[in-house]
Image: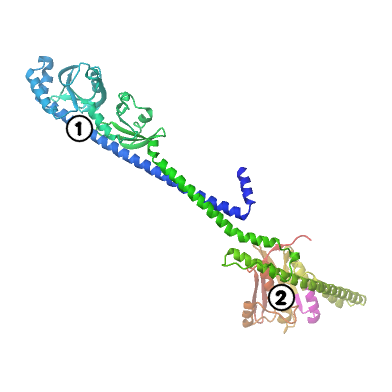
Amino acid sequence: MLGRFAWNRLYGTSIKTKIFVYYASLIVIIFIACSFFLYTYMQSYTRNLVGDYTSSATQQTSAKLDAWMQEIETLSKAIMWNANVRNIMVYYEQNGVDSKDRSELYNYLTLLMTPRDDIYSIQFVENNSFPIRFGNYFDDMNGMLPTLEALDRSNKDYQGGSMVFTGSVLRHAADNGKMTFFAARKIYDKFTFTTIGDMVIEVDYSKLRQVMRQLDNGKSKAHYLLDPTGRVIYSDNEKEIGQQAAPEYAQFLAEPGAPANFTRTISANVLAAFSQSDYTGWYVVSATPLSEIVSPFQRIQQMFLLVNLIGISIALILAAMLSRSITRPLTKLVGKMKGIRIGNIKLDSSQSLLPVQQGYNEIQKINDTFNDMIASINRMIQESYEAELKQKETELKVLRAQINPHFLYNTLDVINWKLVINNQNDISKLVRALTSILRYNIAESGKPVRLREEIAQIDNYLKIQQARFEDRIELVVDIDPEVMELVVCKFLLQPIVENAVMHGFKQREEGTITIRGQVRDGTLTLEVGDNGGGIDRQTLDSLQRSQSFSSSNSTGIGIHNISQRMALYYGNEYGIRFASEPGLGTTVTLTLPAAAGADE
């Protein structure tokens, strides 16, 4: 309702206001739309760019973790196949640990661990006891043994001898809260390939922290390392380590068919990149707040706003100048028009004309048209005055002409009764036929008539001609009664019959004129045929081309007139055709729409 009210108010304002409002609105809409789409595109582009960069960084971090873990697995294989390890694990329950094997194994492990700073301890487990423990280790086994038992029960990879990185993080209170995570694998006898125990390698957590912190680029991001169950192995917030990840993160870990690397939006305000390790199955997650991504656009947004304000201001000024340049000449023209009234226009109207403007545009065209209109009005006033005089003169002539037909009708009526009284019936019939023809001709010629009325006048015409030809011409009408009630143009058939009588029977003692009519598919077809002398080929061709055939003895309404009137009334798709054979006769065919007349 408010919009309609505003539109009605605008619709009723001046052209100047409309041009200003339309042009200014168009420019403002274009500016705002372009700025909005450009800003949205840049924001989306930057978001995708940041997402791709973060995803690439998580993939690189995941690859570094895989390489590190594979080094540890290689180390575990070298230790597992050591002969001293086999001797200790095989004979531990029977003879305990041989001091020589222990010494040689410690020397071997020392040699392996000297260049490494990431291994916290290496421990061998057999039936919940530790035959060999190397490195920094403590007696608190509450975190390690239950994990080994769980692996031995449920982890098929562990049962098959693969190295398994558990992701369990241990905190050693006795070592100032030192944090470690461990990897474990089964130890096999290299001779019998049977299980002889377990190897646990404790890894210094600081190395893992060092790798993960490579993701930190100084932005307010959050980084996580999650195992496939959603347990937190690493987090910037150490309180979250060992806990289950937040549900908004954990839900994406179980997505069926999810790729190894993907990006998701968390809680509509965080962009998180996930990269899963093919080796450990762990997920490296880097979460970036969307506010961090769009913050650089605040200044761009301010610049867009400033540019829009400047552009809109310039557009408003241009709109005002354009509106004024268009409407100023129109305003002058309207002022001149208001000062002119038809009753006050003088024949000498040169002082009322607007001056000719420089250049030639639409306003100048209106100016020229107005000048022409003033001159035309004066000319039309003069012509109207003269036409009014002629009209009065014509009305007087019409009144005089109306007296003559009535006098002629009355005279013919007196003659008819005189003939009846004197028993001159044949001549009386001719007089009545002539009277009917005169009334038919003088009545409105532009008004359509029923077909039966047209046939009746043809019959009256032939009655008069019978007196001349001594009843040697016969009229045959083959038309159904319902077709007789259709409406046709006046004087449509009589000129054709008249030409047949005047030309077709000129050298014959007798003849027959046949009129047929039928309706098919909404089209009325009338045929007027005679058995007269016919038309030669040259004359027929000329007649078909021009359709102009008339006689000085006819009523003056010739074939050409019929063709023109049919085209005018019914259109060019209807018309008249001729067919004739010399010595056999002529047939004229008319086609016109079958139109029913109103009830009389």
Magenta span: predominant SS is helix
Q: Amino acid at mark 2?
A: Ile
- Is 86 left or right of 345, judged from the image as shown? left
Instruction: Determine crowd level at label 2: few under 14, some 14-19, many 20+ residues with C-alpha closer than 10 A.
Output: many
Which range of residues does the magenta coloring cover?
A: 459-474
- Report if residue 463 lies within the magenta region: yes
Which residue is painted at 74% across and 63% down in the image? 485
The tag earlier along the polypeptide, 1 or 2, is 1
Q: Secondary structure at mark 2?
A: helix
Rendered position, 168 above or below 512: above
Q: Amino acid at mark 1?
A: Gln
- Quadrant of residue 235 within the rendered picture: top left
Residue on which disc 1 sits = 70
In the rendering, at what x and y percent does residue 472 appear?
77, 79
In the rendering, at what x and y percent does residue 371 appear?
66, 68
Decide if residue 187 is in sight here: yes
Viewer-proximal residue, 525 or 83? 83
**On the rendered image, what quadrant is the C terminus found in?**
bottom right
Compute the Cα span from label 1 to label 2: 115 Å
In the rendering, at what x and y percent does residue 238 appear?
30, 25
- Pair 1/2: label in front: 1
Viewer-proximal residue, 499 or 102? 102
Instruction: Determine crowd level at label 1: few under 14, some 14-19, many 20+ residues with C-alpha closer than 10 A.
Output: some
Whether residues under marks 1 and 2 lie with C-beta atoms below 8 angstroms apart, the answer is no
Residue on which disc 2 sits = 496
- Report if residue 342 lies within the magenta region: no
- Is 596 left or right of 139, judged from the image as shown? right
